[in-house]
Amino acid sequence: MSRKGTAAALAALLGVTVLTSCSSDNSEGDADKPVTKQLSQGEISQALPGTGDVISGWESYKGKRVTKEASYCTASGSTVAPEGWVRGGSAWFTHDGSTNDMMDVSVCLYDTAQHSKAAYAAWRGGEADKEQDLGKPVGEESVLVTNPGRSEDSLSAFSRSGNVNIRVKIDGTAGDSTGAQDVLAATLKRLQQVQDGERATATAAEQAKQ
């Protein structure tokens, strides 16, 4: 091969490498993009997962709900509404048709990221000895809390992204931390999709493969 041909081939190879690198960077950027839009109630409902969007064995229970009490989005037992709360929604699930095992996916929207950050700290609680890092970070802040307070067979996975807080709470022996994390990641991805004007299609099964 001539010097000119070798140079052209090298340039082409470098070009492909650069494009691949840029593509990877953009993909990661989209995954980490904070939710900053003031989502409507309908958009929150769209982003909440349904049967088939969560982990296997769980089915939607009585549909998606509108969160009417702001205190639902803060520390357990608190009656004080978190500052800056705008609206929220939740979706409940049963395991194999039994209400002995329940999963609650909740989304809480705030007017600013500062207020969501403060509410996130209160919602997750202050039991550091019961907290664990998630296998993969979800959003700007995330944590797993096992058996908060005096509860048994209970776990909650929390995430904060921009001005939105998310909690996946599982009560019962059917809960597992990996599944909770996958549902948490899928819910955040669905919120990001809705924010971008897309249909919410992300599932826990997809997140488990990443």
Image (spheres, rainbow, N blue to C red):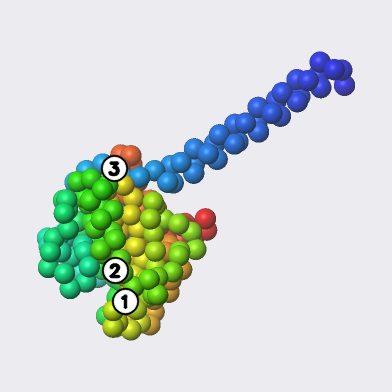
- Disc 1 vs disc 2: Cβ atoms closer than 8 Å? yes
The secondary element bearing badge 1 is classed as: loop
- Which residue has dot 2 on it? 125
- Which residue has dot 3 on it? 36
The secondary element bearing badge 2 is classed as: loop
Q: From the viewer's perspective, tell me whether residue 2 is left or right of residue 203.
A: right
Q: Which mark is residue 27?
A: none
Q: Amino acid at mark 1?
A: Pro
The secondary element bearing badge 3 is classed as: loop
Considering every residue shown, the one lying at the far top of the view is: 4
Relative to 97, residue 187 above or below: above
Badge count: 3
**Residue 46, image x, y percentages:** 26, 52
Relative to 36, residue 17 above or below: above
- Disc 3 vs disc 2: Cβ atoms closer than 8 Å? no
Q: Earlier in the sequence, mark 3 or mark 1?
A: 3
Q: Earlier in the sequence, mark 1 or mark 2?
A: 2
Q: From the viewer's perspective, tell me whether residue 11 is left or right of residue 195.
A: right
10 Å neighbourhood of mark 1: few (<14), some, or many (≥20)?
some
- Which residue has dot 1 on it? 148
In front: mark 3 or mark 2? 2
